[in-house]
Image (tube, rainbow, N blue to C red):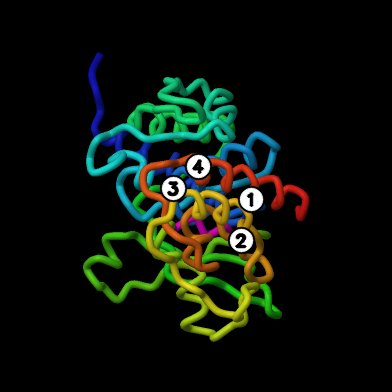
Amino acid sequence: MELNEILISQAIIEEYSKELRTATELDVAIVGGGPSGLIAAYYLAKAGKKVALFERKLSIGGGMWGGGMMFNKAVIQEEAKPILEEQNIRLKKYKENYYIVDCVEMASGLCFNAKKAGAMIFNLISCEDVMIRENKITGIVINWSPVEMAKLHIDPITIGAKIIIDATGHPCEVVRGMEKKMGVKLNTSTGGMLGEKPMWAEVGEKLIVENTKEVYPGLWVTGMAVNAVFGGPRMGPIFGGMLLSGKKVAELVLKKL
């Protein structure tokens, strides 16, 4: 069979453009493709919501790929085990309440299942701003990540969404950018970001789930972005709290929608 390079190019351009056009009006826009963002995308899409996830890097999965200090294994505690079992990701019991998961299987599995559930996933796209109407976030402003990296003066485009989820991890980029640009009052004890605290896995795992919530009208946080906003400690290569936070934000958002 003869291959036509022009048809190959046309197929890629047409199909990508069609999907991006579809994503300009969403129920939920998720910024960040780590474990909590992917879990949120999976449950929201599974519930029939129109959801798209935007990841600035080439690879989807955030810090999952590297495990602990580039040993690509991670720990999951008992409470989060059913989430991975539902997605047919294998776990191996290590000791009571401690399960080992292969990071490559977890990262690729969560990405695959979110796509199969119906979530749209766009990599190499950065969220550089938000759109606000009457004190409510109504969309995100996106551009190609290479544009941001090269510091090119190229205008972005806007994605409309009923709800935005900041799943950008430690930097908490959506909330941080909005606070810096607008000086808005957040749903925290001080009205501002409290900043991530040093390592304390037990406390961090609890707070990351407990504080998964709406921080400004239309804007929710999940995963490590939660601890960055609410002042929780980091946890290291244990991922149960991240998974539970992603599921919780999806459940809360579904009730809101």
> Dot 4 surroundings within 10 Å: few (below 14), some, or many (20 or more)?
many
Q: What amino acid is found at the position of numbered circle 1 in the picture?
A: Val
> Dot 3 surroundings within 10 Å: few (below 14), some, or many (20 or more)?
many
N-term-proximal mark, 2 vs 1: 2
**Going 76% across and 53% down the picture, which residue do you hit?**
257
Identity of the residue furthest to the front in this view: 96
Q: Which mark is residue 100?
A: none
User: Magenta residues: mostly which secondary structure?
Assistant: strand
Span of residues in magenta = 164-168
Q: Which residue is mark 3?
A: 33
Please, what secondary structure does the residue beneath circle 1 have?
A: helix
Mark-to-mark CA distance, 2 and 4: 15 Å
- In contact (CB < 8 Å): disc 3 and disc 4: yes
Figure quadrant of residue 69:
top left
**Going 54% across and 86% down the picture, which residue do you hit?**
183
Q: Which mark is residue 220?
A: 2
N-term-proximal mark, 1 vs 4: 4
| Rendering coords of residue 151 (x, y %) | 25, 73
Nearest the viewer among 155 and 51 is 51
Count all numbered tags in the image, as a single digit.
4
| Rendering coords of residue 199 (x, y %) | 38, 57
Figure quadrant of residue 1:
top left
Figure quadrant of residue 44:
top right
Mark-to-mark CA distance, 2 and 3: 15 Å
Q: Which residue is mark 4?
A: 38
- In contact (CB < 8 Å): disc 2 and disc 1: yes
Q: Which residue is mark 1?
A: 249
Q: What amino acid is found at the position of numbered circle 2 in the picture?
A: Trp
Mark-to-mark CA distance, 3 and 4: 6 Å
Left or right of residue 222: residue 148? left
Is 126 located above or below residue 33 in the figure? below
